Every structure is written in structure tokens, then in C-alpha cells.
Image: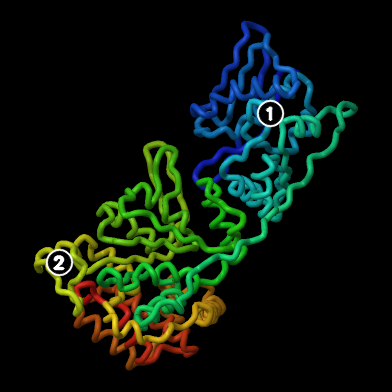
Amino acid sequence: MSLAIVHSRALDGLLAPEVTVEVHLANGLPSFTLVGLADTEVKEARERVRAALSNSGLEFPVNKRITVNLAPADLPKESGRFDLPIALGILAAMGHVDVGKLAELEFAGELSLGGELRPVRGALPMALALHRQLPGVRQRGLVLPHASACEAALVDSARVHGARHLLEVVEALRPDGQGTGADLPRARAQIPALRDRVVPDMRDVRGQSAAKRALEVAAGGGHSLLMVGPPGTGKSMLAQRFLGLLPELTQDEALSSAAVLSLAGHFDAAGWRQRVLRAPHHTASSVALVGGGSPPRPGEISLAHHGVLFLDELPEFPRAALEALREPLETGHITISRAARRHDFPARFQLVGAMNPCPCGHFGNPIKACRCTPDMVARYQGRLSGPLLDRIDVQVEVPAVPPEVLARSPDGEATASIAARVQTARSRQLQRQGVLNAELSGALLDEHAQADPAALAFLQAACTKLGWSGRAYHRVLKLARTVADLAGAPSIASAHMAEAIQHRRVLAAA
């Protein structure tokens, strides 16, 4: 048989569309042609496949004209994931591999020159694509390099097989009566002993009771947070301890987060079901933050999906990068559109920002005088646009603490006890409305964020006096609902509303 068909999958954002690898052997001048909108990495498979087959003791058709087509032709293909299916297609076209067995499987893997299989990016999205196939469609098995197979096997319903060398795959696919005919071993989700996440304890933070309460409220409802204060007051220290307040990921959340990390090649099985903390430097571009490139890759906001995105020195980030955060903060996803492709990435992250109130950092500091002019302070704070600040739920001041007060302050409350209250509040929200308070909108907000008449009147008066927008009104209402949940109250009272308003400070007041 001179024509063979092998099934594989490409990566298109978080999707893994099916790719048919067609291999044809014909008489004529010896050549190896690869078509189908292949990137340079894919075209280099010709040399890797040739060397891998020869060094594995397998026959390579040196006197044939080899044509490999990666269909569909209009779908871009990148990386070395097509090495394994191309090699198997050549062997199948020569009659060395059972075509019937090939039809039941999908393959992806990069080959070394010696035939070893190297891991590929996006193993989890490939397994999820098989899992999401329409009912009634026969699900193929997935053959991957061993390390990638252990990752893909986290999707329970996917039939994943792992191999370490090309010869293992070939032996399992020999025609009946040849070779061992042994089936490839079924891959299992091999999660190493999960490392204990070393998160600094909130007990280390002395003083700053208002800021610690703001962190608890933000964690309790999934709200974004901005801390403003002079340098050295503990903003970064508090942010590093914020992750310890959040509960472990659910199975679905863990898969969703791991799929994005797998696409970028950052998935670590030892951190399974643990939330990630992404802290890019303030020189990061808008593409680095929200994603982009060719082909488009997920940015920091997507890599922090179901985790925390910490932006220290917030005003120092490029203006375009900060403005690109506005839509994801509202919707929980990002759409990257280019001339030829359009990609959607999830971005349900918690933003934690920290900044100084002025260029010298001491505006409003009772301990050290500020040397900035009012115009300099206004320009510095003006680097954060009003629409962006409007989308940050909690805005809290982290004031300077005098050394003598710091020395006699007792240790703070332990992270474990605060995390227990956060977990109770989150469980109450999910049981009541199915989402966290920060994600409430429309009819759900009207139904579940019910406030006493006095509390509503208080909020309306505050909005009128402070000139808050309708978005700010609803975000304070969500904050008050979280404060009430932390207190175990069925409805929002005036005290809950007052605390929520206090947590949403205007930047100029800091």
C-alpha cells in the first residue's frame, strides 16, 4: 500500500483540532515533500524522521518520492508534535504497520535522532478535545510520549497510552503475525508526591489590621484588590501571603488551569490542584500580560486562570498593558484577534496590585515628608485610568507604622484560621448561587445581594457624594454581600455596607 493515513491533533489556542497526516510513496526521483501550512519546526521533521527511522533499525524508503500532507490545509501547524505520526505514516505506507490499528489511535510526539520520544506542549488540551467529542462518536485512543501521556491521563475519560521510544509504538502496531503485537501500556495520571506549598504565614505581618481584613474580604468573594502605601509598609509581604487564604482548586478548575499551563509548557504535576501565583515584572508588555504573538499564546492573565495575578509597582507598567486588563477583569476571558486567526483564552484571575502613592512614595506618610509637588502626585496617580480603578473592587491604604508601635505589636492571626473563614464564606456562596460574589451580575445580583432599606439608602448616599459610577455601585454591593457572608448573615445590613464602602477607597484619599 502506497498511501497511509494517521490521525493527530494540532493546537489552535486552547482547542486541539484534528489533523489528518496523509503519507504517499511514489516512484520517481527521491524526495521528501511536506505540505499543509507547516511551520519551520514541522518542516524540519523530515530530517528528524529520517534519522530516527535509520537509527532505530527501521527501513526508510530512500528511493521513493515521499509526500506528506497535513490536512486541513488552512490550519497552521507548529512544533515537533507531528514527527511521530509522519514516521508511522511512512512505515504504514510500506506495509510495516497495521493500518487498522492506526485508525483506532491518534498520535503526537517529537522524535530525537535516536528515536526517543520527547514531550510535547498541549497534552491536556488534546485529551480534553477527545473528552468533549459529540456523543455517539467513537473515541480514539491517544498515543503520546510518556511524560506527556501522564499529563493527559488527568482527563479520566480519555484513553491515553504512553511510549518512550519509536520502537515501542511500532512493535505494538505490527501487522498480525509479526512482531510482539503487544498493546501499548495504558497511561495513568502519575502525579508525584504533591509538594507542600510553602506560603508565608499571615502571622508574620504585625499591625495593618485594615489591610489584612481587606485581603480576607477579597479572598472571601474573589474580588480584585489594590494596596496603596509608602515603601516598606508590607504591601508585597501581604500579597505574597494572599495565596494561602484561597482554597484548593476543584477538579474542573484544576483541569481548566492545567490546560492553559500545558499549552504554554508550564504545567507542573507536583502543583496539581494548587492555585498559581503569577508576578510579572513591571516592564512586561501588553502582549506578555494578555497574550498574543504568532501563533497567539496565552498571556499572564490566562496563565493565572483560577489563580492570582500580582502586579507590583502598578503605575510603572506600560499604560497600554494596564488598559488591556479592563475587559478581562469584567468578563473573565480574553479574545485575541489577528488578521487570520481568532483565539479565546480563559482569564478568571484575581488581580492583586500594589503601588506607592507618589514618585517618592511618601505622600501622606506621617513619618517621612513627601518631596513631590502636587502636580507630580497627580501625574503619578493619573497613570491608572478611572475606568481601570473602577473595576478594582477593594482599594485599601497600607499606612506606615512607626517603629516603636511595630516593636510592641503582637503577632498577627495565622493564615490557617483566616483561610477557614474564607472557605466557609465561599462554600456558602457556591451553595446559594453557584458562583462567587465577584461573578454576580444581572438577575443573580438582584436576587442574592439583597440589602436592608437602611443599607441601600447608605450606599446610594455614598455613591452620590463620592461620584461613583453604576459599576462602582454594583461592585460595592457585591463587596457588602461578601462581608455579610464572612459574618454568616442572611442579608446585607448597614454595618456590612459601611465596611464595604470603607474598603473601596478612592486613590486620591490614599
Q: Quadrant of the N terminus?
A: top right
How packed mark 2 is, by other alpha carbons closer than 10 Å (few <14, some 14-19, many 20 or more), is some
Q: Would you name the residue on which mark 2 appears?
A: 377
Question: Foreground: 182 or 346?
Answer: 182
**What residue is drawn where x is 62% and y is 40%?**
119
Instruction: Give me the disc on residue 312.
Output: none
Q: Position of residue 348 (x, y in %)?
A: 45, 62
In the image, 504: left or right of 139? left
Say above or below: 71 vs 143: above
Asked if the residues shown at circle 1 and circle 2 are in contact, with their CB atoms under 8 angstroms apart, the answer is no
Q: Would you name the residue on which mark 1 appears?
A: 115
Q: Quadrant of residue 219?
A: bottom left
**What residue is drawn where x is 23% and y is 72%?**
507
In the image, 83: left or right of 39? right
Q: Quadrant of the C terminus?
A: bottom left
Say above or below: 243 vs 100: below
Q: How many marks?
A: 2
Q: Quadrant of residue 176?
A: top right
Measure the C-alpha gap from mark 1 to mark 2: 62 Å
Find numbered disc 2 in the image and state the secondary structure of the residue it sits on.
helix
Outermost residue on the right side: it is 177
Q: What amino acid does circle 2 point to?
A: Val
Q: Position of residue 424 (x, y in %)?
A: 54, 81
Q: What amino acid does circle 1 point to?
A: Gly
**What residue is drawn where x is 40% and y is 68%?**
239
Say above or below: 180 vs 456: above
